[in-house]
Image: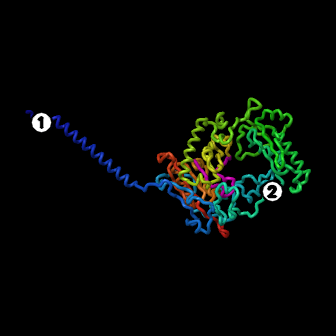
Amino acid sequence: MAKEHSGSPKLHQLESKRKRLTWILAVSGLCIVFYVMGAWQGTSPAPSSQSEVYTRVSCDGGSPEAAGGDHSSPLKSSSSPTTTSSVHLDFESHHQLVVNSSDGSQEFPPCDMSYSEYTPCQDRARGRKFDRDMLKYRERHCPSKKELLRCLIPAPPNYKAPFKWPQSRDYAWYDNIPHKELSIEKAIQNWIQVEDGMYLTEVDRVLRPGGYWILSGPPIHWKKYWRGWERTQEDLKQEQDSIEDVAKRLCWNKVIEKGDLAVWQKPINHVECVKKKQIYLTPHICKSDNADAAWYKGMETCITPLPEVSSSDEVAGGMVEKWPERAFAVPPRISSGSVPGVGAEKFREDNEVWKERVTHYKRIISPLPQGRYRNVMDMNANLGGFAAALLKYPVWVMNVVPANSNPDTLGVIYERGFIGTYHDWCEAFSTYPRTYDLIHAGGVFSIYQDRCDITYILLEMDRILRPEGTVIFRDGVEVLVKIKSITDGMRWKSNIMDHESGPFNPEKILVAVKSYWTGEAEQKQH
């Protein structure tokens, strides 16, 4: 019988298999140990589906009632304006992106009560320094950098959250209105008194082809009301004759005049208008390369040209669908290829993306569909998908397109049946303080972080947001962390959350709620 020696091949094979098995078991054991340790360190309480993140707070962090009286609406409302998961995302010490802003740790004091109605670019004191010719002193005149305020615009004492819609259509809290008497002087509207009907020419510019202009008030029905308007019959008749003449020169058609109303219609194209220009030489049709240009562009005494058509019965620029189908139908500007990089398929995909996002917002902001928010702003509206996705909710949306956007999508928003405007967020927005209940800021700060101090953008958002209003930020983590560090000094309560698609998406969501606080009658200047 043969004897196996230590150097035999069989013994070496057995030893090799034993070592391999030992190595596999060791590695597997280490993996299990590290997994258990990681799971143990990352353990947190299971998040509730709708646990509260923010509570209603007063200026000192207590309850609103403790801050001085009951300010809440008598209508039943939810206990918290915003709800979400109890898991907080912490990125504070891991991201070092430099964003153009002031010291984020600053605590911003309240401004003096004299600023309660402050609208920076429509400041009456500053406006008086400008030319009164053509009412230029009433145009936007924004403060210089050294004039910018670094304080929070106070709400009037005893300010209360507005009534829910539709009650807010008919009712408002007495303490929310700083003026005891509000009146509008309409006796002199001056539609035609500036440079050959320039005001009506501007109305023509913003009207869609086939759109209507309705005039109510002086001089319409002047034979009945001239005494109450404290103007002579001759003066009123001359004004109406002048309006009729300018309307003809603009190629408008008078549809009807009945009672206190007169209605004119803009033509659907300029085929006949070009022929009429042989009779009415003024105003002529502009020779503009970009008819959509409107941001800080002076008014002109010429007719903005409509897109060319092949026949007199064709609507210039294309027909739009009836409402509400119009909100989701492909706009004519997109179907015609007028918006670079955006086709019909991309438009439909954008609609689906925003439907998913708004569904997610409904989960994390429960009052959204309940009438708590009525006035909504989208600071970077793009194609208007956010407004379209909110169509079934009791809200209206101001769609803002950054003035330097490329492509320019404001025309698309109007073709969808929504309201909108251009704006540069390095300047103040032209609206009254506390206008908006909900503000959406998707990618805004990535656009402006290298152009201006984002602190002033956030202070402007605070000015136009009502107490207990909500803001939704969508941006990269680094930008949101910086935003949060600033808003923490503005009496806002906020939390960073995952993207609706999950934690692996680099874009995150920051939901913030402006705390309830009001100014005091004897408040000192800051």
Residue of label 1? 4
* Quarter that holds the C terminus: bottom right
Which amino acid type is shown beneath numbered disc 1?
Answer: Glu
Mark 2–mark 1 contact, CB under 8 Å? no
Q: Which residues are magenta?
A: 419-442
Q: Which amino acid is tagged 2?
A: Glu
Would you say 466 lies left or right of 3 here? right
Side (left or right) of 469 relative to 128: left
Q: Name the residue beneath numbered marker 2.
A: 185
Alpha carbon distance from label 2 to label 1: 117 Å
- Report which quarter residue 161 is drawn in: bottom right
Q: Residue at x 84, y 40 (%)?
A: 248
Q: Nearer the viewer, residue 266 or 101?
A: 266
Does the magenta portion include 180?
no
Mark 2 or 1: in front is: 2
Q: Depth check: 381 or 11 in front?
A: 381
Identity of the residue furthest to the front in this view: 76
